[in-house]
Image (tube, rainbow, N blue to C red):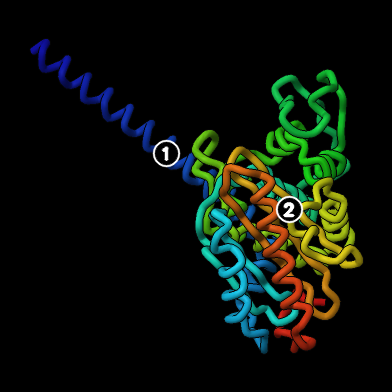
Amino acid sequence: MAARMVASNVKRQALWVAGLLLLLASLAWGWLYWQQRQIAQLQFVLQLEETQKTTVATGPEYDKLRQRIRKDMAESGVDYALFLEDLKSGRQFTIEPDKNFQAASAIKVPLVLFLYALALDKRIDLDETMTLTSGDLAPSSGGLWSYRPGRQYTLRQLAKHVIEDSDNTATNMLMRRVGRSNFYLFLRLAGAHTVPAGPGKGNVTCARDMALYLKGIWIFRQLNPDYGEEMFQYLLHSKIDDRIPAGVPDHIKVANKIGSQIGFFHDAAIVMLPNRPYVLAILCHHPSETEANAAIARISRIIYEFQQSQPKAVQAISPYVP
């Protein structure tokens, strides 16, 4: 009899625990679904989805461009990928566009893009201040790490430091504000092919995604000229110009963001070529930064010369091209 009562109590407890776990799982799923809906309904995300549905009118033929790049890079030893989009025609040219590379600081572009997308929908105030903590400090890039915890910065100031100075401390502060899981969800909903699995599980990207993020800033200039122009100016004033900008004449504006870590060297840019502006992302894997940077600059020069030689594009039917 006693054994039967014990068994009955154990069964009841097991059922109670199972019910509690089911309830917690349901609540967690409901929270994740709500978060996804919140991000999916951002004006910027909806607009970015719309631009992927546009019909391309005309564009340059890229066969000769492909041959020229491959011939130039044949003996370089540089493992590379690229994604080019003509912003007038919508025509795309790619080499290994979905190949994964360590993203390094290139991933900071979509972080700022997410911040401004939240601000556009008044989910966040760019004049809100954050306080620097010891946990934010990251000395490998930028200068904010040298200040004592307790200093305050607006979100707008942090965004400027993230892009112009590639500041890792400012990056940590913004990531703390928007939430890493929310950021990864934003990448997925924005259409990224490669999304990090989580903290410490590989900060990866591909050329297609980096071009998408730069095009996102171009699109943002149409959604909200003030916010879009702020981000564009951050890119114009980024500190390093020895990659894609090095392949373009000085009088042509290039808004770019690089990424660098041991063995991986990247650049992604909006090149403001009159009549044929374009987005270009070039990702490289090579032991030598000097050789990788030189390769990026050479590819940039080849693509610029090709784009510059094309007749004025017939504009694609698209809401994001001015």
Question: Could one spot residue 133 in this view of the protein?
Answer: yes
The quarter of the picture where the N terminus appears is top left
Residue 86: give x, y in percent of width and height: 71, 75
- Residue bearing mark 1: 25
Closer to us: 46 or 107: 107
- Residue bearing mark 2: 113
Residue 60: give x, y in percent of width and height: 67, 84
Q: Residue at x 83, y 80 (%)?
A: 275
Label 2 secondary element: helix
Residue 39 to residue 86: above or below: above
Q: Residue at x 68, y 57 (%)?
A: 296
Closer to us: 179 or 139: 139
Residue 24 to residue 150: above or below: below
Q: Residue at x 56, y 49 (%)?
A: 285
Residue neighbourhood size for the residue with mark 2, other residues' Cα within 10 Å, grouped as few (<14), some (14–19), many (≥20): many
Q: Amino acid at mark 1?
A: Ala
Q: Earlier in the sequence, mark 1 or mark 2?
A: 1
Q: Residue at x 75, y 84 (%)?
A: 310
Closer to us: 252 or 176: 252
Between the C-alphas of marks 1 and 2, the distance is 31 Å
Task: Report whether 45 appears left or right of 165.
Answer: left
Residue 131: give x, y in percent of width and height: 81, 27
Q: Quadrant of residue 223?
A: bottom right
Residue neighbourhood size for the residue with mark 1, other residues' Cα within 10 Å, grouped as few (<14), some (14–19), many (≥20): few
Disc tally is 2
Task: Report whether 292 appears left or right of 127.
Answer: left
Residue 159: give x, y in percent of width and height: 81, 44
Label 1 secondary element: helix
Q: Quadrant of residue 63?
A: bottom right
